């Protein structure tokens, strides 16, 4: 309820934030919306000595279109994503997923950068980032680098970010013609985090077979992952019941999945099947229309 | 002109303006000069011996004023928290000290308190208190606790058994079941719940050394009882030197009835330090230290004859009481449970046996409904399941067994004498509201399309309006359960009403004011309801058991009768007529057959400026009344729910919920409807979402926050369809029965019955609550549900 005493510094630029991060190392934490970090601090599960508040770095609060991709600054809130006209037109699955996060208060404060960097295994965005093949921009002392979403989520609360880097931007593709995406979430009745969340992206070939497909699954395992085996089975085939049944047979291995109060690994595996099937169907329908 | 009626009118709640504008004043809002802050060091272990407590480092922390342990309090003569309900002469009552002395017995048991100038300093220093624990094996499940060789929670209670209690005729019941045509049997757990009032508990001890007076502010439903227990039993200081104030309280659901350790800690340490001491629970402390509810393991068998008439009911329950006896804990799974097992039915023979058991868990006590939801669950699940097993429509099977309207007063085989009721009337009404026949047809059609729709019923009765004091005494309650009221009419005709009940969400400030305004014929704005302060209110037994209107309202009514009788004497004197020549109407005493009258305001002024006044009458207009009810009240009703189960995931969606309740005469229908809504939401919560889970080996509370403990939210619930039937209570002056618990008592069984109704054709006859998607999914596939996540 009351965090351990900590120091607080406000960074006004990315460089200032990086300098502070370099000077204080593991003792410091970046503070964006604070909706993951502050609760952990109140329970004293996280006890940083310094909070570097990056909330005032204005250049990281924009959503803009650039070279066929939509670029989101790390400080863009879930609420801004939920209501972004640009995203609703060019990449509607992202606002749809954002609308499922927490409640309005959380969505008003929480940021996409904070959520991705925190890498909660049950967060919603990771599945969508994987399905969209998003790029995550990390900035460190030597400048910026781009990390593919599938390389980014490495384990429980663990990402490809280096200790001296901060997540600065996220880039998702504008949806190409004859493509569709969907995110379906089976929420934990208590926390409303995903017990399992599945994002699917489908691009259809002229003959309505599946030209490109990506499946991102969150909540099920210690880190969000791509269901590549199933993806491979689907390419070149029409998305129908028979194809889906065959392709999803090997979707996940329950031995790799989490078991907790909300669901056993066995049930999570089942939910992965049900939700992936539904998400693929929905994505394919959207690709058609 | 007719008097403006305030009875049966949905007057907007007068207290809501301050609540919705953030101007409520709760215990934690109170800041006193020189106030200190307490933080309680709690046991991380479910069961451990305390070898030593090292407090030196904590004492040296900046801002820390004192660190106390259980031994400090014991050495100072502080007593054990008493139990207010005795079950049998052999009940085991091990001591319950505010801070543990030699052993800790559940995760969250207090071991020390750090008191500092700021809350942050107290919190920081709490980490510096070093407790040397010798961990002991723990037991959290009540059935496990009864087994040979189970860890012993208290040396005073061999086998962890607090008591064995039984009610009814064992032999007659056994005989009836032995010859029954059909027996329906269920073995189930009525799971433990965590109440989660929106306001965490809070207390401030404020000792005034000059007057040698102690004031305790506490988020309690029951200030007078807390004063009695704290002064006479725990601190052993004179009762008149203790004042207890319960200001605005943000919900309780029973969990704030009881006398808690933190109240003792704040009161005692304020006396020691001569400064006010405040404690407010963090939400995680609420989860582990507020008394929990339910937690029964039950085997129940109901026998039927060839025609579907109930011939007998046998119930065996193991009730988990937790690590210590909370204030009313022993009575909840016994008298408040066993006596309701007849339900609405003519069950000739009933026998119930309950074992109360200690475990290494948070104490369990009354939670909204308190024993009656558990009893309703037994009866209504059995009747519904029997209907499925015998191939009789569940509504029809109930009809065959209802006590009929002409059979009242009806003596059940389990003590209670029901005074009134029309059970079939309520059932018929809810079936009509739902269009039952059409629903069944829709269900059939949906099933053909592969959709799983279920319809559930729950016909409940409750005994509330607690309670006739003689009966309370006969069943071991160590208190009377009457209620008190005082009416103070001021010289300007404005009225203060002092009630010993306590409002923590129920809207008493409105409902009670309506009664007074109606009876005195004055505007509602002229009435102020005062509650929650032992210095202002003569006495009181607090609010729980749906008692406030039936007992507290009746006490107010009695006091009003005295006010009106005295006012009549004054009016007769002023108008120079005999009292019997006057009628009281519209706030005026009128000389019958004339237009000569005197208003209530003039009478009030005369009472306080008695220049022209009867010789033999005392000045002033203020009256007290104590009201002891003649019987319990017996609200009842019929609820119906419709659910749909996702065949792929097992997720249950509640599509409709209909309630027809007979809570007697209604003063404010909007408030009653709100109570039904809230109660139903909590009952649905138990059926589908809520459940406290302890780790069986470590005794850790795994559902210790809202991340893991699921309360129902708006999007879990449909819009409720509420109807009423009004059969006035025959034995209290208001005809009121009580509405606070009805929804919770009915809803749990109602929703579970609906889900089983959706799945019965798949071979599912029962499911453990809460009915999580995984459990439902497993059951649909014939997999064991005990392997499921909670």
Image (cartoon, coloured by chain):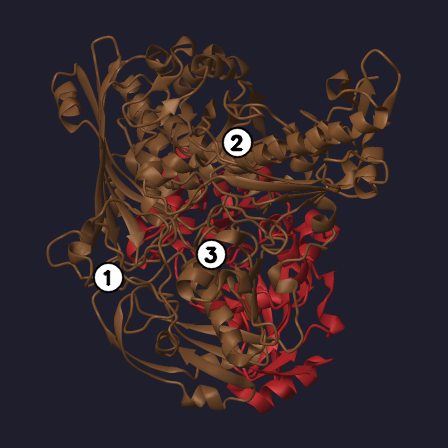
Chain colours: A red, B brown
* Residue B202 makes an appearance in the image: yes
Can you identify the residue that label 2 sits on? Answer: B738
Q: Name the residue under label 1.
A: B697
Q: Distance from label 2 to label 3 (Cα)?
A: 26 Å
Q: What element carries label 2?
A: loop
Residue at (29%, 32%) from the top-left corner? B766
Q: Which chain carries label 1?
A: B
Give coordinates of residue B203: x percent, y percent.
54, 64
In this rendered view, identify the residue nearer to me: B14 or B520.
B520
From the top left corner, tell me how far across and down residue A160 is, in percent: 49, 74
Circle on res. B228:
3
Front disc: 1 or 3: 3
Image-based side of B46 in relation to A1, left or right? left
How far apart marks 1 and 3 lie (CA) works out to 39 Å
In which quadrant of the rendered view does residue B688 lie? top left
Question: Of the residues under marks 2 and 1, which one precedes in the sequence?
Answer: 1
Q: Residues within 10 Å of mark 1 (few under 14, many from 20)?
A: few
**Is B265 rendered above or below residue A186?**
below
């Amino acid at each position: 309820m009351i965090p351990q005493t900590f120091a607080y510094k406000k960074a006004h630029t990315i460089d200032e934030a990086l300098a502070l991060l370099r000077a204080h190392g593991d003792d410091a934490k970046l503070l964006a919306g604070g909706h993951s970090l502050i609760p952990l601090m109140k329970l004293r599960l996280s006890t940083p000595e310094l909070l570097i508040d990056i909330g005032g770095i204005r250049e990281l609060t924009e959503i803009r279109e650039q070279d066929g991709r939509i670029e989101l600054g790390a400080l863009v809130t879930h609420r801004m994503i939920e209501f972004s006209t640009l995203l609703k037109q060019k990449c509607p699955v992202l606002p749809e997923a954002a609308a499922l996060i927490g409640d309005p208060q959380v969505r008003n404060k929480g940021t996409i950068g904070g959520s991705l960097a925190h890498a909660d295994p049950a967060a919603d965005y990771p599945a969508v980032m994987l399905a969209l093949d998003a790029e995550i921009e990390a900035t460190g002392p030597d400048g910026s680098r781009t990390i593919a979403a599938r390389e980014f989520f490495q384990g429980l609360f663990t990402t490809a970010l280096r200790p001296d880097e901060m997540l600065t931007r996220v880039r998702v593709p504008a949806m190409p013609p004859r493509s569709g995406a969907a995110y379906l979430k089976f929420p934990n009745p208590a926390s409303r985090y995903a017990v399992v969340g599945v994002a699917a992206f489908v691009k259809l070939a002229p003959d309505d077979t599946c030209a490109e497909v990506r499946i991102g699954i969150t909540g099920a395992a210690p880190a969000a992952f791509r269901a590549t085996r199933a993806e491979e089975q689907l390419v070149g085939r029409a998305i129908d019941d028979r194809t889906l049944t065959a392709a999803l047979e090997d979707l996940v291995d329950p031995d790799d999945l989490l078991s907790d109060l909300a669901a056993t690994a066995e049930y999570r595996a089942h939910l992965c099947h049900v939700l992936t099937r539904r998400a693929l169907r929905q994505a394919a329908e959207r690709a058609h229309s | 002109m007719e008097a403006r009626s305030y009875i049966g009118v949905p007057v907007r709640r007068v207290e809501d303006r301050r609540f919705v504008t953030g101007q409520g004043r709760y215990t934690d809002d109170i800041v006193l000069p020189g106030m200190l802050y307490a933080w309680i060091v709690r046991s991380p272990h479910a069961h451990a011996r305390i070898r030593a407590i090292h407090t030196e480092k904590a004492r040296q922390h900046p801002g820390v004023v004192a660190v106390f342990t259980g031994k400090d309090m014991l050495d100072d003569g502080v007593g054990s928290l008493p139990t207010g309900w005795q079950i049998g002469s052999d009940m085991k009552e091990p001591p319950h000290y505010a801070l543990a002395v030699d052993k800790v017995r559940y995760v969250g048991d207090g071991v020390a308190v750090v008191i500092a100038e700021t809350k942050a300093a107290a919190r920081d220093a709490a980490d510096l208190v070093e407790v040397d624990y010798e961990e002991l094996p723990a037991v959290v499940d009540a059935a496990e606790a009864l087994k040979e060789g189970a860890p012993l929670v208290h040396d005073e209670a061999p086998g962890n058994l607090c008591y064995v209690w039984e009610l009814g005729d064992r032999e007659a019941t056994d005989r009836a079941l032995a010859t029954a045509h059909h027996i329906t049997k269920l073995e189930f757990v009525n799971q433990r719940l965590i109440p989660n009032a929106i306001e965490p508990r809070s207390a401030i001890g404020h000792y005034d050394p000059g007057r040698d007076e102690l004031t305790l502010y506490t988020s309690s439903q029951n200030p007078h009882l807390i004063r009695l227990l704290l002064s006479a039993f725990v601190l052993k200081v004179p009762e008149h030197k203790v004042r207890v104030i319960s200001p605005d309280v943000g919900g309780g659901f029973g969990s704030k009835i009881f006398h808690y350790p933190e109240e003792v800690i704040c009161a005692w340490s304020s006396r020691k330090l001569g400064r006010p001491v405040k404690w407010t629970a963090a939400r995680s402390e609420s989860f582990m230290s507020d008394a929990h509810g339910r937690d029964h393991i039950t085997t129940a068998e109901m026998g039927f004859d060839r025609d579907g008439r109930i011939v007998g009911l046998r119930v065996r329950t193991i009730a988990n009481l937790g690590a210590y006896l909370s204030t009313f804990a022993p009575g909840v799974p016994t008298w408040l449970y066993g006596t309701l097992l007849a339900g609405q039915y003519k069950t000739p023979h009933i026998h119930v046996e309950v074992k109360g058991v200690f475990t290494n868990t948070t104490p369990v006590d009354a939670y909204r409904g308190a024993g009656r939801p558990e009893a309703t669950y037994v009866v209504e699940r059995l009747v519904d399941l029997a209907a499925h097993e015998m191939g009789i429509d569940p509504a029809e099977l109930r009809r065959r067994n209802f006590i009929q309207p002409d059979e009242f007063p009806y003596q059940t085989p389990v003590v209670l004498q029901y005074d009134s009721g029309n059970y079939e009337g309520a059932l018929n009404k809810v079936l009509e509201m739902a269009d039952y026949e059409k629903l069944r047809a829709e269900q059939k059609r949906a099933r053909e399309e592969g959709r799983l729709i279920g319809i559930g019923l729950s016909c409940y009765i409750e005994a509330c309006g607690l309670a006739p004091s003689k009966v309370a005494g006969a069943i071991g309650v160590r208190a009377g359960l009457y209620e008190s009221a005082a009416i103070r009419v001021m010289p300007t005709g404005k009225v203060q009403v002092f009630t010993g009940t306590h409002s923590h969400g129920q809207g008493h400030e409105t409902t009670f004011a309506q009664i007074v305004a109606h009876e005195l014929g004055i505007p509602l704005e002229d009435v102020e309801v005062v509650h929650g302060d032992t210095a202002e209110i003569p006495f009181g037994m607090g609010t729980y058991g749906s008692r406030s209107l039936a007992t507290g309202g009746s006490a107010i009514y009695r006091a009003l009768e005295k006010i009106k009788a005295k006012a009549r004497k004054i009016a007769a004197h002023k108008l120079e007529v005999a009292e019997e020549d006057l009628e009281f109407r519209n706030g005026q005493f009128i000389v019958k057959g004339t237009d000569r009258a005197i208003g209530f305001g003039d009478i009030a002024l005369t009472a306080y400026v008695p220049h022209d006044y009867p010789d033999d009458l005392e000045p002033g207009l203020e009256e007290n009344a104590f009201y002891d009810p003649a019987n319990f009240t017996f609200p009842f009703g019929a609820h119906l729910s419709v659910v749909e189960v996702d065949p792929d995931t097992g997720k249950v969606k509640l599509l409709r919920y209909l309630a027809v309740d007979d809570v007697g005469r209604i003063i404010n229908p909007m408030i009653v409807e709100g109570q039904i809504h809230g109660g139903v939401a909590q009952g649905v919560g138990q059926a589908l979402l809520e459940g406290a889970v302890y780790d069986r080996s470590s005794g850790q509370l795994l559902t210790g926050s809202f991340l893991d403990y699921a309360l129902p939210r708006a999007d879990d619930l449909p819009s409720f369809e509420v109807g009423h039937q009004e059969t006035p209570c025959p034995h209290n002056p208001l005809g009121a029965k009580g509405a606070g618990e009805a929804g919770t008592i009915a809803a749990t069984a109602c929703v579970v019955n609906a889900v089983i109704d959706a799945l019965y054709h798949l071979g599912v006859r029962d499911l453990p609550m809460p009915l999580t998607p995984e459990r439902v999914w497993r059951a649909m596939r014939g997999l064991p549900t005990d392997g499921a996540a909670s």
